[in-house]
Amino acid sequence: WELLQRARAVDNQIYVATCPPARDAGAGYTAWGHSTLVSPYGELIATTEHEEAIVVGEIDYSLIDQIRMGLPLQKQRRGDLYQLVDVER
């Protein structure tokens, strides 16, 4: 769970905040818990355990611009190689 959040933050050069479903030990699937806030560098800024809690952390929006200037992934996109298709299911 945490590794996936960190990967999405780095992949997209953004902050990622997550909150899992409520933990129910009697359910067929027991959520792991651990709400988090992750920086665009993939660093864990704030997290909780599996108990009910609130995540509090500081987001520096200028860091996003700094990272995107240092590694301009969005400018390297090749939109000519793919297209987005909206499909009704």
Image (spheres, rainbow, N blue to C red):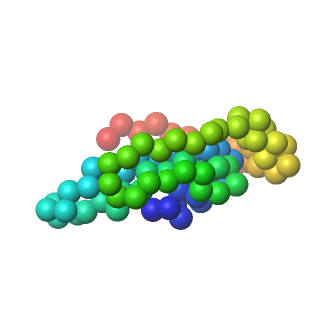
Q: Nearer the viewer, residue 67 or 82?
A: 67
* Quarter of the picture holding the N terminus: bottom left
Task: Tell me what residue is drawn at x 64 percent, y 38 percent.
Answer: 59
Task: Tell me what residue is drawn at x 36 percent, y 37 percent.
Answer: 88
Task: Tell me what residue is drawn at x 82 percent, y 42 percent.
Answer: 66
Q: Which residue in the rendered view is the most extreme toward the left?
A: 26
Give residue 26's position: percent from left, percent from top. Answer: 14, 62
Q: Nearer the viewer, residue 21 or 84?
A: 21
Q: Is residue 14 left or right of residue 46?
A: right
Give residue 25's position: percent from left, percent from top. Answer: 19, 62
* Quarter of the picture holding the C terminus: top left
Task: Tell me what residue is drawn at x 26 percent, y 55 percent.
Answer: 23
**Image vertical order of residue 8 relative to residue 26, above or below:** above
Can the viewer see residue 12? no
Can the viewer see residue 14? yes
Q: Is residue 79 left or right of residue 70?
A: left
Number of marks in the image? 0
Q: Nearer the viewer, residue 12 or 38?
A: 38
Q: Quadrant of residue 28?
A: bottom left
Give residue 62's position: percent from left, percent from top. Answer: 77, 35
Give residue 56's position: percent from left, percent from top. Answer: 52, 41
